[in-house]
Amino acid sequence: MDAQDSLFAEDPPAPAVPADAAPLAGVPLAERLRPQTLAEVIGQQHLLGPGRALRVAFESGRIPSMILWGPPGVGKTTLARLVAGSVQAQFIVLSAVLAGVKDIRDAVEQAKDARRRGCATIVFVDEVHRFNKAQQDAFLPHVESGLFTFIGATTENPSFEVNSALLSRATVHVLKSLGDEDLTVLLDRARTLLQAPPLSAAAQLRLVAHADGDARRLLNAYENLVATAGDVAEFDEATLERALGEMLRRYDKGGDQFYDTISALHKSVRGSNPDAAIYWLARLLDGGADPRYAARRIVRMAAEDIGLADPRALRLALDAAEVYERLGSPEGELALAEAVVYLAIAPKSNAVYKAWNQVRDLVRRDISRPVPDRLRNAPTKLMKSLGHGEGYRYAHDEPEGYAAGEHYLPDGLGGQRFYEPVKRGLEARIAERLAELRTLDDAVTTPR
């Protein structure tokens, strides 16, 4: 379980410094500021506002099984604890990183003991996506019987990471990153608790931007800043840089944000918007993504979305990848940026991409059609006697270097078309050439 996952107050009064602050010195700041009541919670008003789903559940005392899906540091654990407290339920915590089937069995036995005492149980599983199918299935009979209420927390899309059977028995609530105003309130509360010097306006903006909607990240960074900056009258941006250094890079390169950013980059290139494309590339690299991965994706974009409308795009993307290998960061990143801009403004065609997918689908579903005899190789007398190569028309010996009316697909697939070039870039000329060749084919009156 992530013991520091927090959700913070909307408009509560700033908390006073507790009289027993010294004994709490070893407790992480995020844990010390964890809300104890729903009134202290900030953000997630789409779930906690009047008449909203979780607020209604809190007020009614009827808590259904649920999955809390959202990025780190937005309050998944805190909400689960508050839910349990609101109905006076036994709260059992399992971490999918550490727990196994034995721990699930122990939780079931605790829930049975609590039921005999007339007490409800909530089983909270942090990072539920890390449980395998068998472990997730172990909850099903007990959720169905009502032995306990199941609450799972995940940073990954539950549609892909949670078994459909468990997913169908739980309500999914999507938590959002905290806004800058929420984080600013949180920062003020942390400063009051620690009795720390103020932040300059620039330093506060930088720290909030670094948090990127993650309350825990903000508090961890701020606590580190207070502990390492020394005795200063104000925390300015230079102090922030010295104290936090590489911590200021803000990215979760293993989660949904990583793939969302890649998706935004790809869609911006496909949408021919160079400004958005280099923005998302910068976000990707600023977040700590491997530039080599970005280079591979750029090559993919050239092949998938530009294709033969501008064949130079693929070569330029490959060149950019090679330049990065030679120069490294940050110099080599410029070559990646050049490639992204070129791809964004290049004419677009996914004709080959579509044709390739259609052919693969056909080959997967179709029978293994034999190669027509006229197209078979005939290096030996035996093969020639079997008719291999018989009737083949050598295109170079034909008028205009084209064997009009000839078919090269297997018998039964004659006339099938997969590749249809678009009328953009070089493919417009390719389309004209194909039209000319098809006109020659149509003039041949004896189909094969």
Image (cartoon, helix red, strand yellow):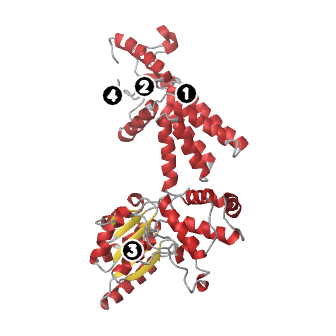
Residue closest to the far bottom: 117
Q: Quadrant of residue 439?
A: top left
Q: Which residue is mark 3?
A: 38
Cα separation between marks 2 and 1: 14 Å
What is the secondary structure assignment of the residue under circle 2? loop
Classify residue 359 as left or right of residue 227.
left
Q: Nearer the viewer, mark 3 or mark 2?
A: 3
Cα separation between marks 1 and 3: 59 Å
> Vertical placement of 293 versus 360: above or below?
below
Q: Which residue is mark 4?
A: 412
Q: Which residue is mark 1?
A: 311
What is the secondary structure assignment of the residue under circle 4? loop
Residue at horizontal 47 percent and vertical 71 percent from the top: 96
Which callout, 2 or 4, points at the residue further toward the start of the chain?
A: 4
What is the secondary structure assignment of the residue under circle 1? loop
What is the secondary structure assignment of the residue under circle 3? helix
Q: Which residue is mark 2?
A: 422
> Vertical placement of 179 versus 441: above or below?
below
Give coordinates of residue 440: x percent, y percent.
Answer: 39, 11
Which callout, 1 or 3, points at the residue further toward the start of the chain?
A: 3
Amino acid type assigned to the residue bearing label 4 in the image: Gly
Verify CB contact (< 8 Å) between mark 3 and mark 2: no
Q: Nearer the viewer, mark 3 or mark 4?
A: 3
Residue closer to the observer: 371 or 153: 153
Amino acid type assigned to the residue bearing label 3 in the image: Leu
